[in-house]
Image (cartoon, rainbow, N blue to C red):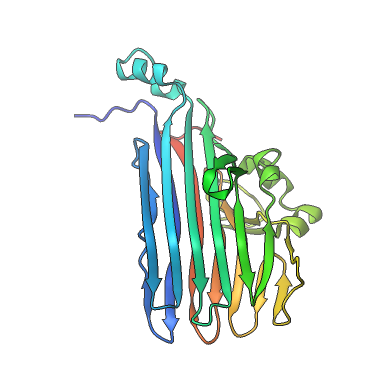
Amino acid sequence: MQQDTQRRFVFRGSAIAFGGQIYRPEGVVLVTHGSSALSVVGGRSTNSVEGADFRQLVTIGSASADVEGAFDDQEKARAMSEHKVREDTLATHTIARATVEGITVGREKRVRIGHVSARMRAESAPGRHQPRFKFPKERVRSRGDQEIDLHIADMVVDGKPVEVIFDAQRFSDDLSTFQKIKSRARSKPFMEQHGVLLDSIGESTRLGRGQVVLVKVFRKFVWPEGMPPRVKEVDNSLVIDDFGTIYFGEMFVTDVDRRLTLVRMKLGSPEGGDIDFAEVQTNGSWFPPIPP
């Protein structure tokens, strides 16, 4: 029996609260309890964890991950289920959220983060190859009823508080598609501001399908009480002597998806390993594919 070849939407989205591995002084895998992923037909996936302690190298107070994917118009979706309209006439959305509270890293607890959260939304219109992305603000009661998109709060490094400011709004507005990013990706001002790195499977001088842009969704650090002497700022990272490097707001972008890691740590000494917090990915694509 031949499979139905009418175009359908393949949902895809994930949210990972935390993950990684410690290699020294002992091997520890951060088993990722707080993660969620969508099935190909959409719906909702959610998960949470209360308290996690990885041999005092990494401790977490709580974490949650949530992903949902659906057709925008549920009346039209019902009509589609009755074979009255085609699926490729419907618009879709995918939303991924990840939140972590109460993070400490290293046995000396030199880095502490009270709250990390990331939210991303993708929207796919009928007949359009590239989805549109944005970072929606949502009201969060645990943060004093604030409206938050990409957010880090109560971060302390070597006893000094630091604020990490992101550039979420610009990517929600004038850089909302891969086409818009790639049209500016080779300009010097854009590369200087967003630290663009280009890579591709094929020709490196042309951005198209199968190619990846790595950008930083980051603006600046603010030290209300001054920066500690053993810390140095390098672009979107903090290099901490005898600890390692912390990267903020790294986002991989292709023509069909975005994958954002809000906090990534590459531990140096005395511990060694790779861990990350609040990673979200959203996309979705039509099958058979729509030509770009």
* Residue lying furthest top: 84
Whether residue 260 appears in this view of the structure is no
The C terminus, quarter of image: top right
Residue 2 in picture, x, y percent from top left: 23, 29
Q: Nearer the viewer, residue 5 or 150?
A: 150
Nearest the viewer among 282 and 62 is 62
In the rendered image, the vertical position of residue 170 relative to residue 196, given as above or below: above
Q: Position of residue 242 (x, y in %)?
A: 60, 85
Residue 262 image-quadrant placement? bottom right
- In the image, 197: left or right of 41? right
Q: Is residue 282 left or right of residue 199?
A: left
Q: Residue at x 76, y 56 (%)?
A: 193
Q: Residue at image x 69%, y 82%?
A: 230
Q: Residue at 68% x, 43% y: name it.
A: 169
The image shows a total of numbered marks equal to 0
- Residue 85 sits above or below residue 129 on the image: above
What residue do we see at 71% from left, 51% from top? Answer: 185
Q: In the displayed structure, does residue 228 sit left or right of residue 261?
A: right
Q: Give coordinates of residue 279: x percent, y percent.
A: 50, 55
| Observer-nearest of 69 and 289 | 69
